[in-house]
Amino acid sequence: MSHVEESIEVNVPVRDAYNQWTQFEDFPQFMDGVERIEQRTESLLHWKTKIAGVEREFDAEITEQIPDERVAWTSIGGEARQAGVVTFHRLDDGTTKVMLQLDYDPEGLTEKVGDKLGFVKRQATGDLKRFKSFIEERGGTATGEWRGEV
C-alpha cells in the first residue's frame, strides 16, 4: 500500500467546507480524473475514474462521517483498492484546514511507476487546490449539504 497526506487552507468556515465535501456527485467538478460518482445510499458511492488513461470503476463505503469533522471511506469492490479520510480543522471563523490521508494499492506497471514518480501525491495536491477554488469562488456557499452521521 502507498500513502499520501496533503492539506490546504480554504477561506471558508468549517461548516461550508464540510458541506461541500459531502456533495460527492460534484467531485468531478474539481477532481481531475473523476468522471462520475453516483451516491447510491447514504454510505455507498459508485466511482468511475480515468487517470493517466487507466479506467476504473469501484464502490466505496463511507465508514465514518461526523459533521464538520471528518469523512472516512474504503473501497469495497471493483477495480481499485483504497481507503482514506478527510478531516476539517477550524483555524478561525472564516478559515478551514482540509486534510486528506489516502492509502491505495497501485496495480499494474503503469500505476506502480506513476506511484513511484509521485503522480498520486501531485494529483491529490491539485484536487485540493481545485476544491479551494471551487468553494471560494462560490463565496463559501456549498452546492448542498448532508448533516447526517455514519
Image (cartoon, rainbow, N blue to C red):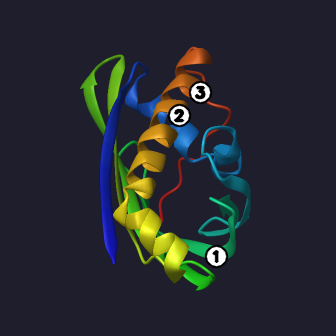
Residue 7 spot, x, y in % from top left: 32, 40
Residue denoted by label 3: 134
Q: What residue is shown at x 54% (from left), y 72% (from top)? A: 110
Q: Secondary structure at mark 1?
A: strand
Q: Is residue 48 above or below residue 11?
A: below
The residue identified by callout 1 is 59
Which residue is rendered at x = 34% and y = 33% of the image? 8
Please tell me whether mark 3 sits on a helix, a strand or a loop: helix
Q: On the image, which quarter does residue 68 sit in?
A: top left
Residue 51: image quadrant is bottom right
Mark 3–mark 1 Cα distance, whole angstroms, equals: 25 Å
Residue at image coords 69%, 61%: 50
Query: Which residue is identified by label 2?
Result: 131
Residue 53, given in percent of the width and then of the height, sits at: 69, 62
Q: Going from the N terminus, do you reach mark 1 or mark 2 first?
A: 1
Does 139 sit left or right of 8 as displayed?
A: right
Q: Label 3 crowding class (10 Å Cα cut-off): few <14, some 14-19, many 20+?
A: some
What secondary structure is found at the residue carrying circle 2? helix
